[in-house]
Image (spheres, rainbow, N blue to C red):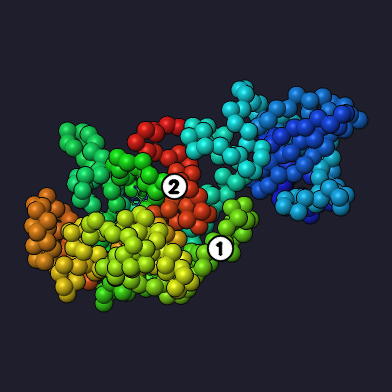
Amino acid sequence: MERVLISESPKFIGQVIKIAGWVNVRRDHGKIIFIDIRDRSGIIQSVVIPDEKETYETAKTLKGEYSIEVEGLVKERPASAKKEDLITGGVEMEVKKIKILGKTYAELPIDISKEEMDLNLDTLLNNRVISLRNDKIKAIFKVSAEIVRSYSEFLRKEGFLEIKTPKILSSATEGGANFFKIKYFEKDAFLAQSPQFYKQSAVSFFERVFEVGPVFRAEPHFTSRHVNEFTGLDAEMGFINNFEDVMRELERTMSYVMKSVSKNCVQEIKKYNIEPPKIKNVFPRIKLTEALDILKKEFGKEISGIDIDPEGERLISEWVKKKYKSDFVFLIHYPAGTRPFYTMPSADPQFTESFDLLFRGMEIASGGQRIHDYEQLVRNIQKFKLNPNDFEDYLENFKYGMPPHGGWGLGLERIAQQILGISSIKEAILFPRDVKRLTP
Ligand code: AMO
């Protein structure tokens, strides 16, 4: 007999089927043993009665998280026992045969059988191989996978080629000090802080590219939105007229991603009890300087520097939500000193042709137009007190007809975090890395 998925069991009422999964929980009620069995598709309640002698003896030995194969008769549950919140809530299984596939050799450190585990972040992360078996936690990764799938699908339709760029680099790409230096044989090397240089150079051969790949940042601080390794969803496009073209593309990409997640992750979103994102076809755009004025006027918030801080991002998003009913907002024209050297200056050179995209109060993307003229780029590198000789390979492309171009970098985990309303980004990473956490 072929195995079927647990979620398919309601189609087999009155028939014997074979399933495989884990013992979510075993309950002994007098003579009857109930086993909730979980596979990748769902959970079903099964019942073992003493008449099935050998099976009953096996059932008595089962512990939480044993993996088993079970044959049984699918039966409709009495109306009073139906569970509306389960896909299989209308059926149960009368067990005929149990085969143990994998035993549990240790006490389970945490109880994952209930959807709501109510554990603190450290406990969840320290016991990751177990906590990741919980259905509500698994839902986060189904949403992440749908983000990546729909992101890639949309960009392919738009003529972007998927590329993979090296993660071991000879120089740091994003400036600042948040890079990891590693030993590379006789030399020093850096883990990529972004695919920035290589995606720009790919524009000169493919025009439009995107990448889904790891990004490394040596952020020394603990926040609910920073980790030291995350997944970047990057894109870069050539022959643009201005950075508005880039925002337009990103806006259409995010609309597609949000619609796909809302449509294809209904069960997952339900578990988090949140509203699917509100999508407008055009996201509001606000100049950063105006946003700082709004914060002062509407919220009495003074920003000390020239850039916005996380609380400012939250407040401005709140204001946008009220005024424009949008969960997204572009903050545009960041001051020159706040962006890397490759960013195109605006007509007023105090500012840049750049943006951040905020979603429900948090930055999820940065991007903009890049300097494409070789001589202008060399001058800007010098203006940043950097040495153009250190960027020789990057600059090479710019000597040969580099077209006007721009792009963005999105953080996958922040998107998932904000869609589901999760408090820490680390919950949206299978095995997160932070200053103190290099295992599991
Ligand atoms: P930036 O440095 O703003 O831009 O990064 C882009 C996006 O990556 C995510 N992100 C992070 N996520 C988790 N932990 C971190 N430590 C972290 N740092 C950044 C955010 C952020 O918006 N090269 C440019 C992009 C471009 O211009 O194309 C860049 O890397 O979601």
At a point 61% along the width and 27% down the height, the residue shown is 108
Cβ at disc 1 under 8 Å from ligand 1:
no
Q: Kindly identify the amino acid type of the residue bearing the numbered disc 2.
A: Ile
Q: Kindly identify the amino acid type of the residue bearing the numbered disc 1.
A: Pro
Q: Is residue 198 above or below residue 294?
A: above
Q: Position of residue 83 (x, y in %)?
A: 77, 50
Q: Position of residue 189 (x, y in %)?
A: 21, 40
| Residue furthest out toward the right | 51
**Visible residue check, residue 79:** yes
Quadrant including the N terminus: top right
Ranked by sequence position, the earlier of labels 1 and 2 is 1
Cβ at disc 2 under 8 Å from ligand 1:
yes
The answer to whether residue 35 is left or right of residue 278 is right
Dot 1 falls on a residue whose secondary structure is: loop
Work out whether residue 182 or residue 218 is closer to the camera in this orientation and state it: 218
Quarter residue 207 falls in: bottom left
Q: Is residue 19 above or below residue 33?
A: below
Per the image, the residue denoted by label 2 is 425
Whether the residues at callouts 1 and 2 have beta carbons within 8 Å, the answer is no
At a point 25% along the width and 44% down the height, the residue shown is 178
Dot 2 falls on a residue whose secondary structure is: helix
At a point 37% along the width and 67% down the height, the residue shown is 298
Count of numbered tags: 2
Per the image, the residue denoted by label 1 is 276
For ligand 1, give the image quadrant: bottom left
